[in-house]
Amino acid sequence: MPAARAGFHSLVRVEPKPPANRLASTAVAAVMKPIDEQHIAEPGLVVLDIASADEDTVQAVMATLEERWAASGIGPVRRDPGEPGVRARVYADVLRPGRECQ
């Protein structure tokens, strides 16, 4: 046992690092604009982050939100490296009606 233990101490110590996909996610998050005070400055203003398995579903949700509330519309859909599915962000005013409610 002492011989095995001596071999163990001669190994190089490896410092733990975050998984590679976490670094990629951070890079993507840096591209997405942060939610600032203006986006939620008054009651009724919301920021919605949408996640789904496919782009068609995300676009359908954005279109439905736009019909119901005054919203930023169908925006870009993104894929985060190392993460499943797709994501999008919508800004909306839930106190004002959307296209079909006016």
Image (spheres, grey):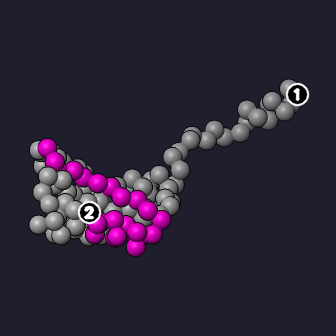
Q: Does the magenta stretch include residue 86?
A: no
Q: Mark 2 points at which residue?
A: 65
* Label 1: which secondary element: loop
Tell me if 46 is positioned left or right of 50 in this view.
Answer: left
Q: Which of 29 and 101 is in front in this view?
A: 101
Marks 2/1: CA distance? Answer: 66 Å
| Magenta-colored span | 43-64
Q: Does the magenta stretch include residue 49?
A: yes
Q: Mark 1 points at which residue?
A: 1
Q: What residue occupies the far top of the structure in this picture? A: 2
Q: Position of residue 101 (x, y in %)?
A: 16, 65
Tell me if 54 is positioned left or right of 96 in this view.
Answer: right
Residue located 73% across and 32% down the image:
9
Amino acid type, mark 2? Leu
The answer to which image quadrant residue 41 occupies is top left
Q: Which mark is residue 41?
A: none
**Residue 78 appears in the rendering:** no
Amino acid type, mark 1? Met
The N terminus: image quadrant: top right
Mark 2 or 1, nearer chain start: 1
Q: In this view, does 94 lie above or below 59?
A: above
Residue located 76% across and 35% down the image:
8
Callouts 2 and 1 close, C-beta under 8 Å: no
Q: Where is residue 5 in the image (x, y as percent from the top left)?
A: 81, 30
Residue located 17% across and 50% down the image:
45
Q: Nearer the viewer, residue 33 or 97?
A: 97
The answer to which image quadrant residue 7 occupies is top right
Tell me if 21 is positioned left or right of 65 in this view.
Answer: right
Query: Disc 2 vs disc 1: which is toward the camera?
Result: 2
